Amino acid sequence: MMSSSPENQFAQIETDIESIPETRRVRAGPLLQFIIRILKSPSATSRLGLFSRYLEELKKDDNVTKITASDISVEKITEIFRLETNLFSQNALWQLNPENNVKAPKILYEHLRDLRDGYEERSEATWRTAIDIILIQCCKFLKSQYAKASAQSYAEAPATPSNVPGHSPLQTKMPLKVCAESSISAEITHPLNSDTRIVVTGRADWALGYKGDDAALLVAIEAKKRSGIGRGEAQLLAYLAIIRENRRKAGKINTTTQGFYSDGEFFCFVAVRNDSTVRRSPMIDINLPHGLDIVFSFLVTMLDTALKSTPTASPTTPGAQQEKEIRNYEEEVWAQSYELVQRSLAPPDSGDEDMDDVVTID
């Protein structure tokens, strides 16, 4: 009688493993399957690779669930981070207070026009470069405004021994650092199972903060192709929730995080506030009348309010005013900058289901 082939022997062994009582198979089964794979491998090199992978599997914590920001839905983010959101509700839509509207500088219009003339209009390089150009001009504008306010305040201050350069109510620094392709992550207890932890990871196209660690980040930005811009909302919200969670764990006074997602022409601004509520702007098209001015104003205000949420980065000189802004951030900073959209948002027929609320704000 001829002996069975190795293939048949392996098949029989695997069948026998399945017949082991479950209480024993849970512990012994994976090891036995690993031994079979080693026996089947044709060389010492492949056997070593199998062994290394098995060790990596053993290192994994069974009580940790890993999720990437690019694969998560708004509903799942809301559940995991316990956010209060209905991004498409009338009550969740927000806009700038009218006094915060400013006109985008002429140079910004010129640079974007040059970009459209010189680059393929729908390429990835074009819309990423457009966002970079807008971001650079916003930072430049804000730093200039700080310098003007500082000089004016110093000139108007009464003559006292303390009235010396460097002690004006507004500093001229712009401490926000822009980090491209920034890897971020947060670990949080599962909302339905306290024995399980969830690790959410992602790579924000841009993240802005005042230091290198995750707890010092304040703003996140996500760039998407026009065809995928609808998915940018969930991805951006995941980044903002990660940043907020890290600030919360670090004991920060204010945990509000802000950002936007865009394809370089359409922009939507989103914020997760101290009280876990989420706010979302209407979709803004920079090609419509005043569209670029609105985006520019929104981004300038977003950066300014982000800076004023923490004493480490605040442009306001340490003292009573800064303390008031930090401790009463919602009333002193946020409410002075933003408001809910009060009027009806009747969307135009854009022919794109992801652009279902494109509006201009007067």
Image (spheres, rainbow, N blue to C red):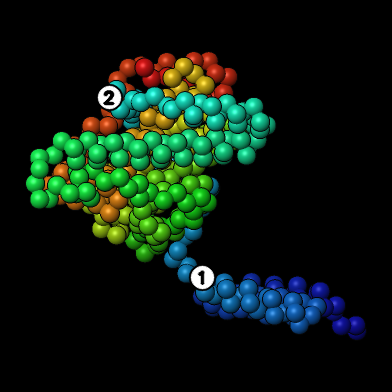
Residue at 23% x, 32% y is 336
- SS category of the residue bearing label 2: helix
**Does the rendering let one see residue 28?**
yes
Q: CA distance from mark 2 to mark 1?
A: 53 Å
Is the C-beta separation of discs 2 and 1 under 8 Å? no
Q: Left or right: 215 with respect to 180?
A: left
Quadrant in which the C terminus appears: top left
Q: Say which amino acid is labelled 1.
A: Lys
Identify whether 80 is placed above or below 141: below
Quadrant in which residue 361 is drawn: top left
Residue 100: image location, x then y, percent:
30, 27
Identify whether 11 is placed above or below 323: below
Question: Closest to the observer: 337 or 174?
Answer: 174
Question: Closest to the observer: 157 or 56?
Answer: 157
Identify whether 43 is placed above or below 325: below
Quadrant in which the N terminus appears: bottom right
Mark 1 Cα-neighbour bin, 10 Å: few <14, some 14–19, many ≥20: few
Residue at 24% x, 39% y is 151
Question: Closest to the observer: 101 or 166?
Answer: 166
**Does the rendering let one see residue 332?**
no
Q: Nearer the viewer, mark 2 or mark 1?
A: 2
Q: Left or right: 39 with respect to 213?
A: right
- SS category of the residue bearing label 1: loop
Q: Left or right: 229 with respect to 278?
A: right
Mark 2 Cα-neighbour bin, 10 Å: few <14, some 14–19, many ≥20: few
Residue 278: image location, x then y, percent:
34, 38
Quadrant in which residue 340 is drawn: top left
Q: Say which amino acid is labelled 2.
A: Glu
Question: Closest to the observer: 120 or 75?
Answer: 120
Q: Which residue is mark 1?
A: 60
Q: Which residue is mark 2?
A: 99
